[in-house]
Amino acid sequence: MKKILLSGLAAGLVMAVVGMVLNMLWGKIFPGLSAEYATPLFRPWSDPLMSLMFVCPFLSGLVMSKVWYTSGGKICLFSMCLPGTSPNKDIIGFASVFILMSIIGMLMTYSCFPMSFLMLVTWCVSMVVQYLVGTWVLAKMSK
């Protein structure tokens, strides 16, 4: 249990940092996104509920850690996790499950809220990178 908790928190921390860096990067590359975040659709940073944005990567890291140790890191959507595959393919295969579920959620969000396609794409790319890096942390900590 201690190993699951520590590796999940470590993965969550790395995922949170990667997410913050990517969000700053998206703002520099696409200045229009900053204006979109300033609309009434989004809460201002002064709202205490915005602190939940920092909790989500840690919860994801803990869930990923539990699934990683329960499955031995061998859950995947594609044929990438066949016996004899490289650790990198195992990481991609494991993360693909979480990536797919996140993208489905992002599509639902896009269908319900007046947000730009660019925002959807930046969120999806950020989630892909975060889950891949989080899974890499889990893989390194489980050795």
Image (tube, grey):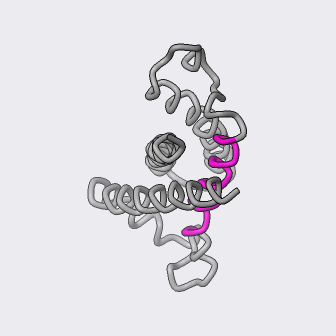
* Closest to the observer, 73 or 30: 73
Q: Position of residue 65 (x, y in %)?
A: 63, 48
- Vertical side of 64 occupied by 28: above or below: below
The residue under the point 58% across, 60% down is 6
Q: Quadrant of residue 86?
A: top left
Residue under the image location 40 percent in, 67 percent down: 35
- Between 9 and 36, the one lying in front of the other is 9
Quadrant that contains the N terminus: bottom right
Q: Is residue 63 magenta?
A: yes
**67 or 79, nearer to the observer:** 67
Q: Taking 29 as reference, is 73 above or below it? A: above
What residue is shown at x 41% (from left), y 62% (from top)?
17
Which segment did they paint magenta? 53-69
Would you identify the image quadrant in which residue 93 lies? top right
Magenta: main secondary structure: helix
Percent position (x, y) of residue 119? Answer: 47, 51
* The stretch drawn in magenta includes residue 130: no
Spot occupied by residue 128 in the image (x, y as percentages of width and height): 49, 41
Instruction: Give the number of marks.
Output: 0
| Residue that extends furthest to the left in the rendered view of this protein | 28
Give the residue displayed 54% in from the left and 18% down from the top.
80
* Vertical relation: 59 (above or below) 136: below
Between 75 and 97, the residue placed more toward the observer is 75
